[in-house]
Amino acid sequence: MKQLQHTLRKSYSFEGKGLHTGKVATMTINPAPENTGILFRRTDVSKDLYIEALADYVSSTDRSTTLTKDGVSVVTVEHLLSGLTGMGIDNAVIDLDNIEVPILDGSAKPYIDAIWPSGIVEQSAPRKYIELEEEVVVTSTKTGSSIVVTPSDTPSFDVKIDFNSKVLGVQHAHWDPSMVYAEEVGVCRTFVFFHEIEYLFKNNLIKGGDVDNAIVIVEHPVSREQLEHMSRLFDVPMLERCENGYLNNLQLRYPNECARHKLLDLMGDFRLVGGFLKAQVKAVRSGHTINTNTAKEIRKLLKK
């Protein structure tokens, strides 16, 4: 039995600040006709310019994935693309009135909560799967990361993370169609190391970061003064380091939530191949750069 395409039953709007720019945006995810794919439109720039969710348009992977076409950019698309993919949505037009997709809670959960219960409708056209005839391998000696994509009738994603962290350890995460993405992957939030935060702020990143949208890993002992400084930075009551090495701003949804979030990112970045990929994807120490570079390699193969 052929899988049919799906879109949204109606439009859904979300408002919030971008993680990296700190700019507040309203984003509306709209239904779209069959064979549209996923399109972004910056309504504050032009209502006639559509940016396709394709690896061809990746312009930056500095802590998130940015798409740029004709000088117009959309920043931090990966969580939204992951959520749409995990929910099985083929076609959507996403209107955004600023440069960056709102970070919301740092996962795809807000999209799932709004759309999943009754917001998806089946269309008539069969889904167009992306199928490969050969294995694709991409590695990075600089980061020690690798991704192996093997043709398969049953898609799956496997992630291994290793940050040389005593708190995180080595974590694994897996998804295949027998699992419920909405419950096991989409709810998992982004994360950052405590010692990275000030550096990221100084380099104009995570301007929209706060203690509600990121897991904070406190790898090294920190002083009371450092915690007070961090509390002032985020304008929240006094933060503390828990015994498990995480900041007390959030409770983990899974013991391996950080690996599951990397899986979420991977699935979002891989939507940039142009659709639903029929392959087994095995990623080690992956990030947006190697994710999108692999998606670009797949796109090259498809164009041959």
Image (cartoon, helix red, strand yellow):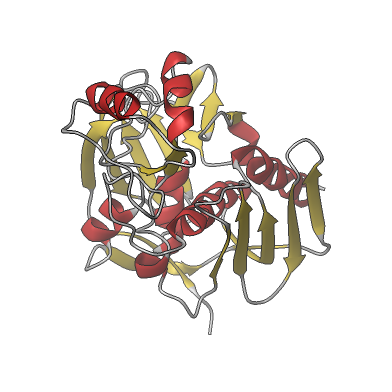
Return the residue nearer the eye: 303 or 112. Answer: 112
Q: Is residue 50 visible?
A: no
Q: Is residue 82 visible?
A: yes
Residue at image location 28% in from the left, 45% down from the top: 105
Up/down of 93 relative to 197, above or below: below
**Residue 276: x and y, percent?**
56, 61
Instruction: Please give left or right for residue 193 compared with residue 138 in the image.
Output: left
Q: Position of residue 42 (x, y in %)?
A: 37, 26
For the point 21% across and 42% down, the residue is 13
Nearest the viewer among 43 and 152 is 152
Q: Position of residue 274 (x, y in %)?
A: 59, 50
Specify whether 95 is left or right of 26.
right
- Considering every residue shown, the one lying at the far left of the view is 237
Q: Residue at x 43, y 27 (%)?
A: 197
Picture quadrant of residue 50? top left
Q: Residue furthest bottom?
A: 1
Relative to 239, residue 151 above or below? below
Q: Where 119 falls versus 2 (above or below)?
A: above
Q: Nearer the viewer, residue 11 or 174?
A: 174
Residue sitting at x 75%, y 68% = 151
Left or right of 39, for residue 118? left
Q: Quadrant of residue 98?
A: top left
